[in-house]
Image: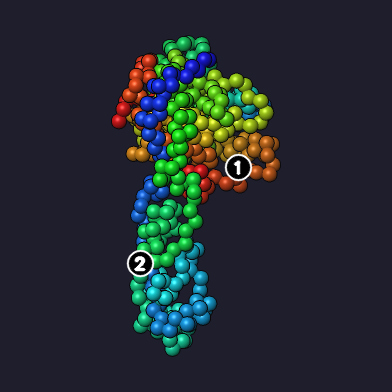
Amino acid sequence: MSENELSAEDTAFLEKAFELAQEALDEDEVPVGCVFVVNGTEIGRGRNRVNETGDPTRHAEMVAVTEMWKEHGTGCEDLLKKSTLYVSLEPCIMCSSAMYQLGIRKMVYGAENPRFGGVRSVGSAEKYRMEDNVQIVAGIWSERSVAMLKTFYEKLNPFAPPEKRKTKKPKLDEIK
Amino acid sequence: MSLEEPPEKIRKIDTMRIKVYPILDSTLTCDTIPSTSFQALRLENKKIIGTIIRRLPELPEELSHLKRVGKDGSVLIAESEEVAKLIVGKLEDAEARVEDLVPVKVARTKPQTRRQFQVAKELWPTGFHPNHELEQLLDGSFLTESLKKYVDRWLGEAARLGDGCIAVQNDELLSTGRPSSHPLGHPVMEMVGNLPKRHGDDYLGTGSDVFLITEPCAMCSMALVHFRVKRVFYARNSRNGVLKEDGWQLHLEPSINHHYEVFRVEGLLDNNYIVDNSDRFCSNIQL
């Protein structure tokens, strides 16, 4: 997918998502930010707040949905069904599954996430036993997205950059 | 919250009735093992076995579970006939003849369970290092009376919440959750959200056990990964659950960097424990 396929509107909202990711990075959170948009209007936004809240599920997308729910009550469900999500990194399995369940219209995201990515990398709608009815625009501004993650991990733990971390364990360890 | 124990009499019956099944990788529950053909050299003179082995190249790493010598004293040479003939020819030993090469069946992968080991060693002598925890899961001996009581108690509490979720850490209640009006207010998400604020750098749920009435969807199952849960017990399969055997199983996905054990508990829901059945999440259609 190339940048050329993005409209000026797409570019502006994705830029907003990246700014929120930068805000997360400045607060020592995993640098991911997102914006929900309906018909060219922002209806919600969020950025990672896991450290701040001590809640490991407070990813950008979840934070945004909760804010929308607080503002609109259950009415946010109808809004979400019409929405496009702009997010700086491929949503994890938890957030992707949430998006399929909320039935949003479209997702535009930055780098793919080979460890947790829930749209295509590791998980998928089919694996979640959900209908695959969300339009996907993937891999936009990947380098920028990855550079932010790298800065975060270097800041956090200079001894274990993400690309050096062990992601696969031997089978026998998995059931222990 | 108050956690009153049900009367002792009812408890006894319930505890006897529940069954707890681990949901394991099919490569572990499978009693067969893939085999492959290998060239072995028959030796009339058993005294030269040692000398011959010392002059042979090592077996490939992926077949290092195989013993070099078979029950009848023949020696593994190579996988392909062509290579085996070359190797035996190079030995230039009058007692090691190319004509004495025979194809044998060997286990292609290292046996992971005792059952698989029994099958493998029938083919060809094979090394095996038992994993005792795994063997207990496979033969059912993991389910001690105290574990049964523990599961019965906490899953019973989850049932009393309706379509509930309960996290237990070091035998103490950590948090509870039940469906809410939040568009993603599934029991697991509510349980995590209801936790008191974390202190220190540890993941709050590290090492905890989670009890659920309904098999969690992908969102909830992944939230439990983020929560660093150790074991998950649930009572009924759901349509979009991702832990049961048929289909993608999140807890067995190798790319994910944390894995928890999963158990399905049967026999608990027969006794009308569930009061609120109006759940709209983790679609709880019994399969």
Residue A127 at x, y percent in the picture: 38, 36
Residue B184 shows up from this direction: no
Q: Which residue is mark 1?
A: A162
* Point 33% across, 24% down: residue: B270
Residue B150 at x, y percent in the picture: 48, 29
* Amino acid at dot 2: Lys
* Point 45% across, 21% down: residue: B157
Frontmost residue, B214 versus B82: B214
Q: Is residue A61 above or below residue B123?
A: above
Residue B105: give its label: 2
> Element at badge 2?
strand
Residue B145 at x, y percent in the picture: 45, 34
**Circle 1 Cα neighbour tier, 10 Å, few/some/many (<14 / 14–19 / ≥20):** some
Q: Quadrant of residue A148?
A: top right
Q: Nearer the viewer, mark 1 or mark 2?
A: 2
Q: Chain of mark 1?
A: A
Frontmost residue, B55 versus A59: B55
> Element at badge 1?
helix
* Point 44% across, 88% down: residue: B94
Residue A84 at x, y percent in the picture: 45, 24
Q: Is residue A145 left or right of residue B187?
A: right
Q: Is residue B237 left or right of residue A49?
A: left
Q: Is residue B41 above or below residue B201?
A: below
Farthest residue toward the front? B9
Q: Is residue B199 left or right of residue B132?
A: right
Farthest residue toward the bottom? B94
* Point 64% across, 43% down: residue: A161
Q: Is residue B135 above or below residue B37?
A: above
